[in-house]
């Protein structure tokens, strides 16, 4: 039997910690590599070793790989904010491209079988004015973040051709669920839940003009993302997979559904559009459904998230 040892970069973060949990439940040996820049040690289940390492630190990355000897890497660590990438594109590329390459080189040196990569369906396809973006839709990255994620996707293919390192790219929609950080610049569900529970108003940034429902996004529950990572790690998925639901929800609809799940009266304030935000992004979930069945619907996902948010505030 081949050894099943998974190193989850970004494992102390929101999505990474769910991947860690799912892998442990499935019987993998798991370790996390994270610099704790936005992640937290408390997100990790007890007993999971954390290499407190920045992916830009080559000797430290190499040492972690030599120490743990993973068979699979789930690469979640990233500069994950679109707006930070717009302000600091070099920093974004240093973490998402150079840091990612450090991970790939260490993986290659240790004979890792497969790298699963957290890419972005929400940003990589650009505007999706109608319908849903399938994996065949040509990428149109508008932000440095989307460009760095797409560049890394290309590096994965290059490493497969040059060195035989297998990979799976998972292009996530807007992921939400327990443990999402409400203090960052992304993660609208966590930010809104935090504010609603504190009795504070939430801003609905308009899509075109104040008072409209705001951007339309494909919200996907974090357990579906973790499931997809596990299936990818086992080699059960195609090399490229959207992780979404095919359902578009406006910011206003999201806020109303979340308020209902939290059982609070929400104070929704119209706000101007945010420059740089895509108006609409929805992902075709057909491939996801073929491999993993139905993704969780928004109502049930928000119900679970609301329960968690109430308990952990
Ligand atoms: P997150 O910020 O909770 O997780 C990212 C983790 O990476 C954090 O724990 C952070 O400490 C760690 N990290 C950041 N820079 C690092 C560095 N230089 N070295 C080592 N660790 C570092 O965010 P998340 O939402 O859990 O995102 C996980 C992955 O999923 C990211 O790659 C992100 O781009 C991708 N993604 C997220 C979404 C979403 O909706 N949340 C959508 C598409 C893609």
Image (cartoon, rainbow, N blue to C red):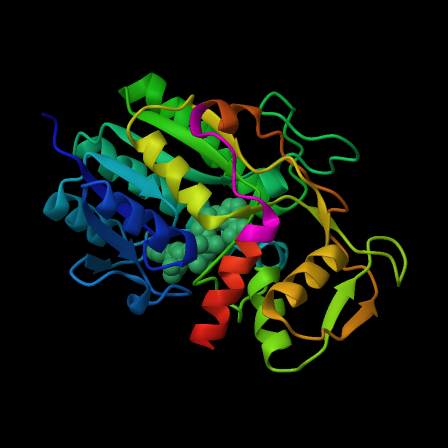
The reply, left or right, for residue 70 in relation to residue 166 is: left
x and y percent of residue 33 in the render?
A: 27, 54
What range of the chain is rendered magenta? 291-300
Residue 296 is one of the magenta-drawn residues:
yes
Count of numbered circles in the view = 0
Q: Which of 259 and 165 is in front in this view?
A: 259
Could you tell me which quadrant the N terminus lies in? top left
Please say if 196 is above or below 243: below
Q: Which of 293 and 139 is in front in this view?
A: 293
Residue at (32, 41) in percent of width and height: 74
What residue occupies the far bottom of the structure in this picture? 199
Please say if 277 is above or below 239: below
Residue 79 visible from this viewpoint: no
Residue 244 is one of the magenta-drawn residues:
no
The quadrant in which residue 155 appears is top left
Q: Which of 234 and 54 is in front in this view?
A: 234
Residue at (63, 71) in percent of width and height: 263
């Amino acid at each position: 039997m081949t050894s099943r040892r998974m190193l989850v970069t970004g494992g102390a973060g929101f999505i990474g910690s769910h991947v860690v949990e799912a892998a442990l439940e499935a019987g993998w040996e798991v370790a996390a590599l994270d610099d704790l820049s936005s992640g937290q040690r408390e997100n990790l289940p007890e007993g999971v070793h954390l290499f407190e390492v920045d992916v830009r630190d080559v000797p430290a990355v190499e040492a972690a790989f030599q120490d743990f000897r993973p068979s699979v890497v789930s690469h979640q660590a990233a500069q994950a904010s679109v707006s930070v990438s717009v302000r600091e594109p070099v920093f974004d590329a240093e973490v998402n491209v150079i840091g990612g390459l450090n991970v790939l080189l260490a993986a290659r040196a240790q004979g890792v079988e497969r790298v699963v990569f957290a890419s972005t369906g929400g940003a990589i396809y650009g505007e999706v004015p109608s319908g849903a973006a399938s994996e065949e839709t040509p990428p149109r990255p508008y932000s440095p973040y989307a460009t760095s994620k797409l560049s890394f996707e290309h590096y994965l293919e290059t490493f497969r051709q040059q060195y035989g390192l297998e990979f799976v790219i998972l292009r996530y929609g807007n992921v939400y669920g327990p443990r999402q950080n409400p203090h960052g610049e992304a993660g609208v569900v966590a930010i809104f839940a935090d504010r609603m529970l504190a009795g504070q108003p939430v801003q609905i940034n308009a899509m075109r003009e104040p008072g409209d429902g705001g951007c339309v996004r494909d919200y996907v529950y974090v357990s579906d993302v973790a499931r997809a990572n596990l299936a990818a790690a086992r080699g059960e998925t195609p090399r490229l997979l959207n992780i979404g639901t095919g359902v578009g929800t406006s910011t206003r609809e999201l806020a109303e559904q979340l308020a209902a799940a939290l059982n609070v009266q929400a104070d929704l304030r119209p706000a101007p559009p945010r420059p740089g935000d895509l108006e609409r992004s929805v992902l075709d979930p057909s491939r996801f459904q073929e491999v993993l069945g139905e993704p969780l619907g928004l109502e049930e996902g928000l119900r679970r998230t609301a329960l968690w948010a109430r308990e952990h505030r």
